[in-house]
Image: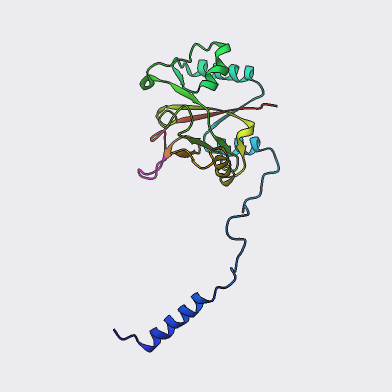
Amino acid sequence: MKVSPAKENILKRVRNALSQPVQMPFPNAEGNNSVFETAHEGLEIKFAEEFTKLQGKFIFCSSYDELAENLQALVENKEWTHVHCKTPSLQKVLEPYKPAYLNVGDERTLDAAITDCEYLVARTGTIIMSAAQPSGRALPVYTPVHIVIAHTHQLVFDLKDGIARMKEKYPGQLPSMISFATGPSRTADIEKTLVVGVHGPKEVYVFLLDEA
């Protein structure tokens, strides 16, 4: 097949360009530096602001006693009788308070579920979860109300910080599933009308415990 002179000229210029590497015109565009300014206020404040913008419910607790009191008040206000928790560390924390609502009955009839999380992303109000958590894959999605108990040391500023921390926590073998939940489940697929709680929890609470 005969190549026209004009086309051959273009191909020649391409070959020459590929054989002579040039300096990258925008060396800082590879994502090494964040394009977002780190918040000057505390990460817990930034997370609370972004999380509540997305219809999430945020409760700050300064002690385990305050955590237990706030959980009890929420359960009584909502009149829940079946709250599920499969996380041993959280069961151990709540056990001394003997919450009557906490049980391990049929997951199909639960009112809410309590889980831990991997990290909280302050800039976007996002909860990072994974299959490595005791709650597993299904519980945080199946439950109608998701209650997350987290600690202040789990706060990171941006998503890339959360991913970096996950790589440090699970060196060489990340969990088979990592999910990013930003507020309650929502969709606007049908006639552009926002509907909450279609593909997951209709309510999401984050109880943030300050270890200091």
- Placement of 41 over or under 207, stated as above or below: below
Drawn side of residue 168 relative to residue 197, left or right: right
Left or right: residue 14 versus residue 28 is: left
Left or right for 147, reference 38:
left
Main SS, magenta region, reads loop
As displayed, is residue 67 above or below residue 14? above
Please tell me whether residue 9 belongs to the stretch shown in magenta: no
Seen from the viewer's position, the closer of residues 7 and 209 is 7
Which quadrant holds residue 81? top left
- Residue at 52%, 12% (x, y): give it: 99
Residue 189, quarter of the rendered image: top left
Q: Position of residue 72 (x, y in %)?
A: 55, 16
Residue at image point 38% right, 89% down: 5
Q: Position of residue 116 (x, y in %)?
A: 53, 28
Considering the image in quadrants, where does the N terminus appear? bottom left
Q: Judge by depth and name the residue closer to the eye, 206 or 137.
A: 137
Residue 61 at x, y percent in the picture: 64, 24
- Residue 136 to residue 189: above or below: above
Residue 9: % across, % down: 43, 85
* Res 73 visible: no
Is 189 contained in the magenta span?
Answer: yes
Residue 67 is at least partly visible in this image? yes
Q: Given the current orientation, which residue lies at the most extreme bottom position?
A: 5
**In the image, farthest residue toward the left:** 1
- Quadrant including the C terminus: top right
**193 to the left or right of 154:** left
Highlighted range, magenta:
187-197
